Amino acid sequence: MVARWPFPILLTVVFITPTLAQGPKREAVETILNEALPIGRLDIAKERLVDHLAQDPQDSHAQYGLGLVSVLESVRNLGQNLHRYGLRPTMQQIPILRLPVPENPNPEPITHENYNALLQQFIDDLSQAARVLEQVTDDNVKLKVKVGMIRLDLDGNGHADEDETFWKIFTSVAWRAAKLGDEEKEFPIGFDRADVHWLIGYTHLLRGMVEAWLAYDTREFFALLAPTFFSGASRESPLTPGGAGFDPNSIADAIAAIHLINFELDDASRMFASRRHLLAMIAQSRLVWEYALKETDDDREWIPNAQQTSLTPLRVTEQQIQGWRQFQDEAEAVLNGERLLPHWRIKKKGLGINLQKVFDEPREFDLVLWLHGVGVLPFVEEGDVVSDATARSIGAAFQGRFLAFAVWFQ
């Protein structure tokens, strides 16, 4: 005999029951993350999440958790590689080199090939993290993670110490460092679907930056500055090494570094890949806001809409969201060569730099000649140039704090 259920009950079974089931799944994944990550055991978190997915391959919460762990693995591996070669603590103002890794009294010797290899590993690790995150398909996915309590074994000694918390990393690279008290340092974030795309977008941004660097032959540049960056780099020169701040030796090194940013092209395909990553970042950023603008809750949002509470000192307004969308359109058009970039020495109306050609038809890069103007001439053509009015409009939307919002919004 076939049971005949009333239609309202049938609707409840079909639609409501799966939603209720999400609660225990989410809580189970949050428990895994908030137990394993504060003791620096990414391996335990990964193993438990993989086992969880083996039992329930469609659990987007577990897939999301695995993606978060994969991103953290990328950061940890980079930190361990930098520590292996004795990254100096004075280098924390340099992109990629600003992780607060512990000092290494016995570093391994580092060569240009070693440095490029660690950068390639960073690309590979981020690619893997992005592939994991791309498997998240549930629009209602959400994980509350105590980000400030996460520890990462940055020196590779097998355990994460007090000074290897993600909080320390966060305060080394973010503007929020001095604004939180001890009770706030757990810094729980409610990672939702918008943040899936935010994380994927950041993997593309970082990969794009590193691919562009690896596209060029930087051996001479590395030979000069590596001893300043790494205690594991040999210094055969009798010249006194640079220090921190306004040390005259560091100033002299900086001047020489500018002179040596005259790179021969080594691998054109990496520049091509770099542009693709930057375009992918823009596509992911659009998805961030597609999902963020649909949200009606207000639960520890990392990327809030104008009606939600910000976890940062910055506040999001409708004007800023529209300004960001305008920037996305302009940036995409510039990367595709549909809009041209102005140069301070090119005054003729309708002439500008085709950035698509810079990436897809790369040449030697000489910083001084680019600033001078003669270095950009192979890429100058006639077309629609980004106007000062457009730049002012975008800047006005962020009240002069565009860079801070750009780092946050990505």
Image (spheres, helix red, strand yellow):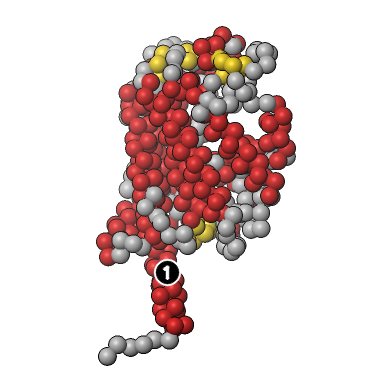
Q: Residue at x 68, y 36 (%)?
A: 394
- Please say whether residue 88 is visible from this viewpoint: no
Q: Quadrant of the C terminus?
A: top right
Q: Residue at x 62, y 23 (%)?
A: 384
Residue 56 figure quarter: bottom left
| 24 displayed left or right of 329 | left
Q: Nearer the viewer, residue 203 or 243?
A: 203
How far across and down, in percent of the image, does residue 115 sit? Answer: 36, 27
Q: Is residue 208 above or below residue 17?
A: above
Residue 359 percent coordinates (x, y): 46, 23
- Asked whether 21 or 74 is in front, the reply is 21
On the rendered image, what quadrant is the N terminus found in? bottom left
Instruction: Name the residue located 32 percent from the left edge and 48 percent from the top edge.
Output: 158
Instruction: Return the x and y of residue 340 as percentages of the image width and height.
Output: 58, 23
The local secondary structure at tag 1 comes to helix
Residue topped by disc 1: 22
Residue 339 seen in the figure:
yes
Q: Residue 36, percent across and down? A: 38, 59
Label 1, residues with CA under 10 Å away: few <14, some 14-19, many ≥20: some
User: Could you tell me which residue is drawn at 47 percent across and 82 percent down?
Assistant: 8
Disc 1 residue type? Answer: Gln
Count of picture labels: 1
Would you say 270 lies left or right of 89 here?
A: left
The relative height of residue 188 versus residue 283 in the rendered view (above or below) is below
- Say if 331 sits above or below 301 in the image: above
In the picture as drawn, the residue positioned furthest to the bottom comes out as 1
Give whichever of 319, 242 is nearer the camera. 319
Residue at the top extreme of this rendering? 374
Quadrant assignment, res 264 = top left
